[in-house]
Image: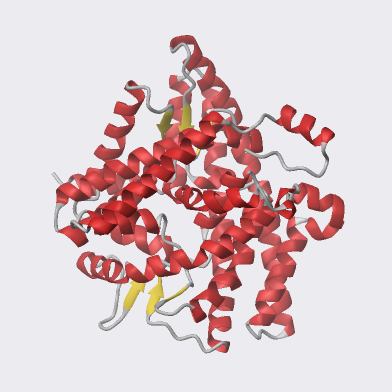
Amino acid sequence: MNWNSIVQAILSPGPSVVISILIMILGLFFGMKVSKAVLSGLYLGVGFIGMSMAINQLVTIVTPATKALAKNTGINLPAVDFGWTGASAITWAWAVAFVFFAIEIGVNLVMLVTKTTNVVNADMWNVWGLALTGYMVYFATGSYIWAFIAGVIQAIISLKLGDMWSEEIENMLGYPGITVPHIEAFTAIIMWPVNRLMDFIPIFNYRWSAKELKKKIGILSEPVVMGSIIGLIIGLAGRYTIANALSLAITVGAVMAIFPVMAKFFMDSLTPFGTTMSNFMKNRFKNREFVIGLDWPVLGQSTELWVTMVVLIPVSIAFAAILPGNQVLPIAGVINYCLGVGGLLLTGGNLLRMLVLGIIYQPLFLYGSTYFTNVFTKLARDTGAVNVPKGSLVSWSSIEAPDLRFLMSKAFTGNIFAWIGLVSLLILFWFVYRSFKKNPVPSKKYKEQLIKKNPKSVVAK
């Protein structure tokens, strides 16, 4: 029996279908009425599909502009960026990828029983991220044991990230009982020291949110207007004709306006589901607050998230051109979800901080993708899932947690300096985690009270 084929067959309908069905089943288990459970599942599916369509449209229209911008600036880099879709395709085709389902589920169960997490991870689609890390370690060490250990470490980190963000997500977006146990949010950990330094710089302590900007700059803060302006700038920078630049501007503006609309379906799905699950758990498990882990698009109603990721597009192209040793031109992965999601969750939606952090940490991803170019290329050729012509290279310009994956790959080969780096990174992660747990994100009511006392202040974590 080919277990990998069975797993791929189950997941073949895609995350929107798999997660929707899972939410329906869980809803019935937690005691929702059949009609409400079905609606929760369907609304969640609509949200994911709508969000995916908008994201794909954004990538589709931005990619030619990115290529034009690179061409007109004379950038010629050897590695082709195939984005997360290419990375997931070659990972699922790896013969032992299905083993990481057992690792994810096993780690989650053990941590729930031992009360070291409150996250029930329903984001099974993204198990491929564990498998990719496993392959990277296997590529470096030749050992499946080390590959599986790396998967265990990443699974633990992801669940603890989910524990960190659950309260903030509820306060920020109004989703009860929901969190994001996604490794791309690990970027927040390395951002934390710089974000902490920003606490001492007055300009970063204003409430730089889309809502506050609207009060100051009016129509210019609307997602459709900001998107149109950004699209126009990208088009003109790529030397588009005026007509094509205006077309790009309108399309980017439209997509930016669609994101909050699609996010409403998440609200309609997750609010009744989260309330029912919370009541179920409280009645059966005293002093426990369980949350469901879902993929990052549930954060899609945040305008700050999309503004940050779109504004950073030309920044990533500029860095690709000037960074010595970089081999990857951001194309399919030019929209860096790691910088957007990590910055959003770390700063609570402070747009200025998110943009500055994104600029500072963008080079990390280009160097990470450059380092793993040979890994991606070999896996693509070995599996045949992506066609890579002889002499060509492929990579992923916005690879998730490049620092963690690099250090595990090097440390497990016996590199003492990598071990020091890995242990230091894990200590930093634990410190940031404890900091969040000891100083939880204030409730909306408490934030409003602080704002009344000092209208220009930001509510610090």
Quarter of the image where the N terminus is located: top left
- Is residue 273 shown above or below 279? below
- Is residue 205 shown above or below 160? below
The answer to whether residue 174 shows anywhere in this view is: no
Q: Is residue 59 left or right of residue 96?
A: right
* 18 vs 194, nearest the viewer: 194
- Is residue 317 shown above or below 19? below
- Is residue 197 shown above or below 84? above
Task: Farthest residue to the front: give it.
Answer: 200
Q: Position of residue 114 (x, y in %)?
A: 32, 22
Q: Position of residue 103 (x, y in %)?
A: 26, 39
Q: Quadrant of residue 113?
A: top left
Q: Position of residue 171 (x, y in %)?
A: 64, 33
Q: Is residue 43 left or right of residue 456?
A: left
* 55 vs 25, nearest the viewer: 55
Quarter of the image where the C terminus is located: top right
* 416 vs 329, nearest the viewer: 416
Q: Position of residue 338 (x, y in %)?
A: 50, 55
The answer to whether residue 412 shows anywhere in this view is: yes
Q: Residue at x 39, y 59 (%)?
A: 402
Q: Is residue 53 left or right of residue 375?
A: right
Q: Is residue 195 left or right of residue 90?
A: right
Q: Residue at x 58, y 82 (%)?
A: 69
The type of colouring in the image is secondary structure
